[in-house]
Amino acid sequence: MVNRLQWGLLRAFYRLACRQAIRPRSVLLLPSHAPGVDNNLTGLTEPLTALGWSVRNLAATRPATAISAETRSAPTKWQRLRQPARTATQISADIATSAPTKRPSPWPPSPAVTADQKAPCPWPETISRRSRRQAPWPLMTTARALWLMARSAVTVIDDHLPMLNPINPRAGSRLIQAWHGLGAFKRVGYTRPTDQGGPARSSGAHQHYTAALVSGSTVRQAYAASFGLPVERVQALGAPRTDRLFNRSARAADQASVWSRWPDLRGRRIITIAPTFRGRGRRGAHYPSAWLNLEVLATALSPNDRLILHQHPFIGPWPTQRQALPEQVIDLTGKIDPNALLAVTNLLVTDYSSIIFDFALLIRAELSERSESAIRWTTDTTNGTAANGRQTAGDAGRGGQETVGPATRGSGGESGDDNLGGETGRVDLGVDRRHVDQRGDREAPSAQVIPPRSLVLYQPDADSYLANRGFYRPMAAYAFGPQVTDLPALIEAIRHPSPPDQTVLEDLWAGDLNACDGLSTGRLIALITGSQPS
C-alpha cells in the first residue's frame, strides 16, 4: 500500500512537471555514486558542453560509513529501555569518579567487544546506522531529479533507481541506462530471484529505458532478459569508465597519485582485497568480517607485502572493533577510485565482483601497448617484486615488470635471482595494437610501471551464493585465477600466485568485453546527441 501511494505521488509530480516544455539539447545525469567515485557518467559533462548541450549532474548517494567503535559499543534505544533504572546513588558515584570535563553517562558501559564476538547492534556491523534511516534519494533530491527529468531531452543513469520505476518518460525525451557493471556475471534484474532482491514484474523496474548500454555483444541477450527490454534496445557500446584503463598516461597518473598519497606503497607487492557485498541491496548490504582474519593474513605476508582493503561502496570501511588494523594492512575504502587502485595492484583478491572484468581489461590494455608478443609473469614468494617490479639497466637480473615509457622498454629478466627467489612463467596472451593506434596516446608524459597481475577468487559461500543469486554462465567461464573457499587456501594463493588463465581471458575479451576498447565515451555521446540511432 505504501509503495502504491508513493508511486502515485511520484507519477503525479512528474506529470505536473511535464506541463513545462522540454528544453532542447539538455541532458540530466543521475550517477549512482557520489562524485568522488568514478562511474560511466563522469567524463560526459565537458564534451557535451563543448557540443553546445546543457548538462545537469545530480549525485545520487553519499558513500556509507561504518559504525565507529564508540557508536558500536553504545547501547541502542531498545537496549536502554530494557535496562533497569539506575538509582541516584549510583549516578552520584559515577559523577564523583569521572573526570570533571567528561559528562557521565547514566547507562552502564557495554561489555568490551572481542575479535570473536559480534558487535552489539541488531544489523550487520559494517552498515552505517545513518544509512539505515536515510533513503538513497532524499525527498527533495527526488523531487528535483523528477522535475529536471521532465524538462530534459535526455536522462542518463548508470544503475537501478527505484524512484523511476513508475515513471514512463514523456514523448520527446529519452532515458538511457549506462549500466555500471561489466560483462554478464551474477544475475541482476528480472533474472534474479525476487526473494533474493530481484524486482517483481509488476514493479516496472528497468522497463522504461529507451536504450541500455552493455560491455559486449555476447551479453545483450542476458541484459535484455534482466531489464525486461527488447534486445534491440540493448546496445554493446562499452562502458565509458573503462576508457581510462586504455589510456597509458592516465594509468601512469593514477600510479603517481597513489604513491604520493601513500608513499609506503611504492616498491611493495600490493595485494588488494575487494569483495562485493552480501544481501539483497543497499539497505541490507554487508560482508561477514569473520571470513577474513586480518591478523592471520598479516602474519602470512612477507615484509615487502602490503594488503589493501577496498569494500563495496554500499558497505563502507572495514570494521576494526576497537582494534587497530595490522601494520601491513591499509583500508582505502572510499578513499580511492577502484580503477586507480588496480593500476598499482599486483594480486587482486575478490569473489563475485565485476571488478574482475576491469582487471581483465587492464591486462588487455597493457598487452596491447607492448611491441613484444608475450608477457612474463613473475611471482615472488619472499620479497614480492623488486622496486615494485620496475626494471632498469642495472636490474637486468631481476624478473618481473617493465618500465613502459617514451624511452625505456624492458624485456623482463631471467628467474633465479638469489635475492628474490621467484619463478617465472611465460604466458603468450597475444598483442592487439589497434587501441593504441586509434587513441594516439603512445607518447606518455611519464613512465608507467606495469606490475605482474594475478587474480584469486576467495569464495567461502560459493555453494549458497550459487543457489541464491546464481550466474549467467558457470563460474569457470569467468575465473582466470584460482578459486579458494577457506583462509588457508587463500594464504597459499597469496604466497604463490598463479599467472592468469590465457584461455579464459581471451574468451572474456572476445565476448563480454569486446565493446570496451577505450572509445566507449565517444559512442555514448554519439547516442545522446542523436548522431547514433537509439
Image (cartoon, grey):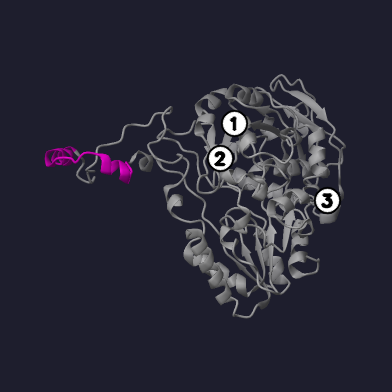
- Where's residue 316, x and y in %? 51, 45
Based on the picture, tell me whether residue 82 belongs to the magenta stretch: yes
Circle 3: element type: helix
For badge 2, the amino acid type reads Arg
Image mark for residue 461: 1
Q: Quadrant of the C terminus?
A: bottom right
Q: Which residue is most to the left?
A: 89
Q: Is residue 457 above or below residue 157?
A: above
Left/right of residue 117 with respect to residue 105 in the rendered view: right
Sequence-first disc among 3 and 2: 2
Task: Report the residue marked by disc 3.
Answer: 435
Q: Quadrant of residue 521?
A: bottom right
Task: Give the number of the mark in front: 3 or 1.
Answer: 1
Circle 1: element type: loop
Residue placed most toward the observer, 143 or 348: 143
Magenta-drawn segment: 75-97
Task: Report the residue marked by disc 2.
Answer: 278
- Where's residue 278, x and y in %? 56, 40
The residue at 75%/31% (across/down) is: 400
Residue placed most toward the observer, 138 or 199: 199
Sequence-first disc among 3 and 1: 3
Assess whether mark 2 and mark 1 are in contact (beta carbons under 8 angstroms).
yes
- Where's residue 179, x and y in %? 68, 54
Circle 2: element type: loop
Residue placed most toward the observer, 372 or 234: 234
For badge 3, the amino acid type reads His
Based on the picture, tell me whether residue 504 belongs to the magenta stretch: no
The residue at 15%/38% (across/down) is: 90
Q: Is residue 177 above or below residue 328?
A: below
Image mark for residue 30: none
Mark 1 surroundings within 10 Å by alpha-carbon count, few (fewer than 14), some (14 through 19), many (20 or more)? few
